């Protein structure tokens, strides 16, 4: 297997249990696996040798929630300045015109930006399967991930509770339950690789309480557990969702999950904002995880995630960028900084330090995905998944007093300098190594424009206009 040596770094931030740092350190990987880390390790004859003088090395970030296809509906004037339900109602009408090529290209863009901002493992929640488009859409994003070289964790999402049945989405973006379950089974059987250094794991992810039926929730959980794969859904994101659950089921969102088999250490929710104290305690004892998505929660005015209470209750918390249309980016390092700032504003000194915020986006996220044996920190026996920044950049001058905190406190105004996934360099000098970025960008923008303009012709809405307030 190919070997990699990264030598003489200004510092390596391991993010291991001892929170070790290795000033002047090196890291050696054989294939995907780190075999040695520290000073003066004797592996000069590695296949690839990277001189990391002046660079700081961090464990690769792990994204626990995303909707990559939404990359094509960012910065749509008509979808700005509204909250979740109105925002979704606007965008469903655009997404229903999505084609397989759009899924592929939007994934290249979103995953590409994640890699360029230090993310090495990305989960995705793909739940929008328009009626008019047959085909295996989720396969398209899997193809994009393989091309880029990112470690990927797609979840086969679903919606079967359309407007005619009292749900939020239009019927045209929902599928019948038997179709959903059959395709979910296909995706798991075709792609899921449970091995330690897998480049592709798959989860099962009905979209949300207001877009799927109770039967689909139950059956999805049974299916996922029969294959030993993880379960993911949106929960407690907004008060509107809570009111929907109370009105239709007479239950609060977490009670509804408890009733349908959707709690346990193999379940992670996106958002988890509107829990009461007793529910937070129950979240801790059931072993569920949460993907905290601060930018999306701020943009859609959803609320502030109770981070301190969740961590005190023993809940596994990781970070996610959420769908690109509510972020409107795929910058996970930016999300680490958002979490740091949001909780400083909300709870002052009780909020996470910069290092703790980085921990949420690495070790915390690895626990949410149940993958802490292989990713999240830089240690012997774990994957060589890392990013590197050049401490000599102008934007860090005057800030080199705490390497652990640097990209969080000082922020990041450029891409990382290098990203390595499983011992392979996938970003070099801030550029993706496996695709022609400018060509993909032009192709993707043309495809996004097509989708939005077709949608405008069908719906009669001018998406380039801003709503009256
Ligand atoms: Zn989401």
Image (tube, grey):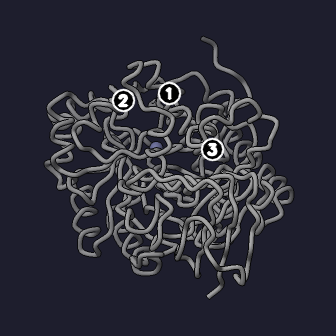
Measured along the vertical axis of the image, is residue 92 above or below residue 295? below
Question: In front: mark 3 or mark 1?
Answer: 3
Sequence-wise, the earlier of marks 2 and 1 is 2
Snapshot quadrant of residue 201: bottom left
- Callout 1: SS: loop
| Residue 330 place in picture, x, y as percent | 62, 46
| Residue 160 place in picture, x, y as percent | 36, 53
State which quarter of the image contains the N terminus.
Answer: bottom right
**Pointer 3 and pointer 1: residues touching (CB < 8 Å)?**
no
Q: Is residue 270 left or right of residue 465?
A: left
Visible in this render: residue 186? no
Residue farthest along the bottom direction in this orientation: 1
User: Considering depth in this image, is 65 or 75 the residue closer to the camera?
Assistant: 65
Sequence-wise, the earlier of marks 3 and 2 is 2
Residue farthest along the front direction in this orientation: 40
Image point (22%, 67%), residue name: 222
Image point (63%, 65%), residue name: 26
Provide the residue designation for mark 3.
Answer: 331
């Amino acid at each position: 297997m190919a070997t990699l040596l990264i030598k003489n770094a200004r510092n390596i931030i391991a993010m291991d249990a001892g929170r070790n740092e290795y000033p002047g350190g090196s890291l050696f990987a054989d294939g995907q696996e780190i075999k040695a880390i520290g000073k003066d390790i004797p592996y000069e004859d590695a296949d690839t040798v990277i001189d990391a003088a002046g660079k700081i090395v961090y464990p690769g970030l792990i994204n626990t929630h995303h909707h990559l296809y939404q990359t094509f509906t960012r910065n749509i004037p008509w979808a700005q300045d509204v909250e979740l339900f109105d925002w979704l109602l606007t965008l469903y009408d655009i997404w229903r015109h999505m084609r397989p090529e759009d899924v592929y290209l939007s994934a290249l863009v979103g995953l590409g930006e994640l890699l360029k901002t230090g993310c090495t493992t990305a989960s995705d929640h793909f739940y929008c399967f328009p009626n008019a488009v047959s085909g295996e859409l989720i396969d398209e994003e899997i193809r994009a991930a393989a091309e880029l070289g990112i470690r990927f964790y797609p979840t086969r999402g679903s919606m079967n509770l359309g407007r005619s049945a009292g749900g939020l989405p239009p019927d045209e973006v929902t599928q019948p339950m038997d179709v959903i379950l059959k395709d979910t089974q296909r995706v798991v059987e075709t792609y899921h690789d449970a091995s330690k250094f897998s480049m592709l794991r798959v989860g099962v992810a009905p979209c949300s309480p207001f877009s799927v039926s109770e039967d689909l929730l139950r059956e999805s959980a049974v299916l996922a557990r029969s294959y030993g794969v993880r379960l993911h859904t949106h929960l407690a994101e907004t008060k509107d969702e809570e009111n929907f659950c109370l009105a239709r089921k007479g239950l609060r969102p977490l009670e509804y999950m408890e009733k349908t088999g959707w709690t346990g250490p193999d379940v992670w929710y996106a958002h988890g904002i509107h829990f009461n104290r007793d529910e937070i305690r129950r979240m801790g004892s059931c072993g569920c995880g949460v993907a905290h998505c601060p930018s999306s929660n701020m943009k859609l005015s959803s609320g502030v995630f109770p981070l301190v209470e969740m961590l005190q209750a023993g809940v596994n918390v990781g970070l996610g960028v959420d769908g690109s249309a509510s972020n409107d980016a795929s910058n996970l390092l930016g999300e680490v900084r958002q979490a740091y700032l949001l909780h400083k504003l909300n709870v002052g000194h009780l909020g996470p330090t910069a290092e703790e915020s980085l921990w949420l986006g690495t070790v915390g996220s690895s626990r949410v995905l149940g993958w802490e044996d292989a990713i999240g920190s830089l240690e012997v026996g774990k994957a060589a998944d890392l990013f590197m920044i050049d401490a000599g950049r102008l934007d860090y001058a005057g800030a080199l007093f705490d390497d652990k905190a640097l990209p969080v406190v000082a922020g990041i105004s450029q891409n990382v300098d290098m990203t390595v996934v499983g011992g392979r360099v996938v970003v070099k000098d801030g550029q993706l190594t496996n695709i022609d970025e400018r060509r993909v960008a032009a192709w993707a923008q043309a495809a996004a424009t097509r989708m939005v303009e077709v949608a405008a012709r069908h719906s009669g809405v001018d998406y380039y206009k801003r709503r009256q307030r």
